[in-house]
Structures are given as structure tokens and as C-alpha cells.
Amino acid sequence: MSNETIKRITSKSLIRMKESGEKITMLTAYDFATAKYVDEAGIDSILVGDSLGMTMLGYDDTVKVTMEEMAVFTKAVSRGVKRAMIIADMPFLSFQISKEQTLMNAGKLVQSGANAVKIEGGSDFIIEQVNALTEAGISVVAHLGFTPQFINTIGGYYVQGKSYENTIKMSETAKKLEKAGACALVLEMVSEESAKYISENLTIPTIGIGAGKYCDGQVLVIDDVIGRFWGNIPKFAKQYANIKDIIKNAVSQYAQEVKKSIFPSAEHTFKLSTEEKKKFDYINK
Ligand code: KIV
């Protein structure tokens, strides 16, 4: 397919997909090559999630991820993607301090190639930031339910909105985020019933991760999907391949072949022309 024929998925496309009942597919990606393959496989949206703190940088949570790190990975992803809408996570402390800082930091991610930024939380302050960003021309994806950047106040990886009352409260917050300009809402670790209620009461699409099948789309962490993650895989993720074992097998075969001088063989070796080789034969006589 030539570049001209590839149409970029936008925030408007996501809303149209919700209206027509077409499910939205989203996966995380953090590097150039993976983003390219995810895009070529036809995924609608790529999230440069701050989960890269764990998957790419080996941190134990997302709180340690910085703006500089997010910008580097966003640039790499954007160079590999032609069709998918790229969403970059605003990392911890990049949007909690002031409107000015929020705008500056979101702007940096957009200049790094993101088509939208994602912000966790639903306090009045966050709703104001969503409004300010949208007014400045930056598309925002909101994120409710379990919000990993709040791990230290939540105290663990717990399902959120587990009662009728909590669901209604979350739905009200979601509506405020929509009114403030959010173009989509990620719902993480929310009961299926709650996610269904919230999705049905919004115009913007919900993208679920551990939120059941009634969301307008689904997102997973690519490392869980392809079996590359080094830690525990959460209950809600499904593994479709085992890249970890493929990597380990290839690497140990390579190492064995080097040890036994099997690699490099003739097909991986450069040779002199017969004429040049003859000169060596003459010298060695
Ligand atoms: O950082 C991330 O990967 C995310 C998803 C879990 C939605 O925010």
C-alpha cells in the first residue's frame, strides 16, 4: 500500500466507530519495530503507555517514568506508524502541578508524534486540565477505574467501582470528562456491569482493559499479548504468542553454534576473488 492511500485513524474515527458499533482495537507499543508491526497488522490505535516503565525500563511501577522517557519512546513509535492513532501517556507529575505545565508537557508529547495524550484520574483538577488541553487543540483520552499512577494511594491492584453507588459516581465523572473534551475513556479493572453502564451513558468510546466485553474497544499491553513480559501476567490479559521462549531458544542456538564454530558458515562469510586469493597462495609458498 502506498503512503497516500493510508488514512490515519483520528479521535473522530473512534467516535464514528462507536456510533456504527465497530469495536476499537488498541495495543501498547514502545519501540519503532514493534509499533510498525502492530500498525501493519491493522490495530486502530497504539498507546505509548507509561507501562513502558515496567516493560522497557524494568521499573516496578509506572510512577518512576519521566517526561523525557515518554518523549523518547513516543518519537520511536511515531516513526514506525502510518495508520494507527498514537496516544501517549502523560506520566506521573506531568499534569498534576499547573495548567501551564500540563500544556507544555502534553505539547512535548504531541511534538514527539502523539495524536493524543492520555491522563489518569477524574478529580475536578484533572477535569480542568482536560478542558485546557482540548481548548489548546490537544486530543485527550481519559482513564478511570484502576489508575496505576495512584498505586501508592490505592494500595494495590484492586478492581474499582465494585458497587452500584460507585458505578454511578464513576459514570458521573466520565460524563464530566466527556463534557471537558475527552475523546475516549480507558476503563481499567472495572466490573463488566459497571463498564457496560458507563459505556452506554457516554457518546465517546470506552476502551476497556479488564473491564469486560461491553466496552467500545479493548486495549492490552503488547508484552502480555506476545508473551514478552518478565513479571506476572494479569487475569484480564490473554497471551497469544510466546516470544520470550522464541528469543531464548534463538539466542541459545546462536551461542552453541558460535562455541562449536558452526556459525559463521560459508553462506554468512565474505570471500576474496580467486585472483586476490592466489596472491596469498603465492606468499604462503
Ligand atoms: O500504560 C499503559 O499501558 C496503560 C494501559 C494499561 C491502559 O495505561
Image (cartoon, rainbow, N blue to C red):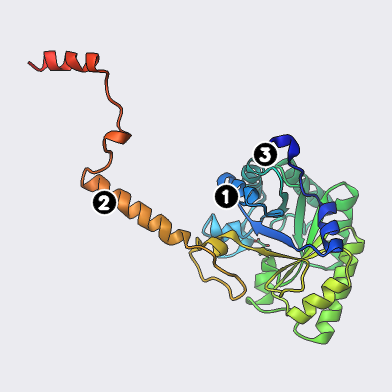
What residue do we see at 36% from left, 52% from top?
251
Q: In the image shown, does 229 or 130 lie closer to the viewer?
A: 229
Task: Check contact, mark 1 vs mark 3: CB within 8 A.
Answer: no
Give the quarter of the figure containing the C terminus: top left
Q: Amino acid at mark 3?
A: Met
Task: Check contact, mark 2 vs mark 1: CB within 8 A.
Answer: no
- Residue 170 seen in this snapshot: no
For residue 123, side relative to residue 31 (left or right): right
Q: Amino acid at mark 2?
A: Gln
- Number of other residues with Cα within 10 Å of mark 3, as a class: few under 14, some 14 to 19, many 20 or more: few
Q: In the image shown, does 222 or 160 lie closer to the viewer?
A: 222
Residue corresponding to mark 1: 34
- Name the residue at the front extreme: 1
For residue 276, side relative to residue 10 (left or right): left
- Name the residue at the left extreme: 285
Q: CA distance from mark 2 to mark 1?
A: 28 Å
- Residue 163 seen in this snapshot: yes
Q: Which mark is residue 1?
A: 3
- Number of other residues with Cα within 10 Å of mark 2, as a class: few under 14, some 14 to 19, many 20 or more: few
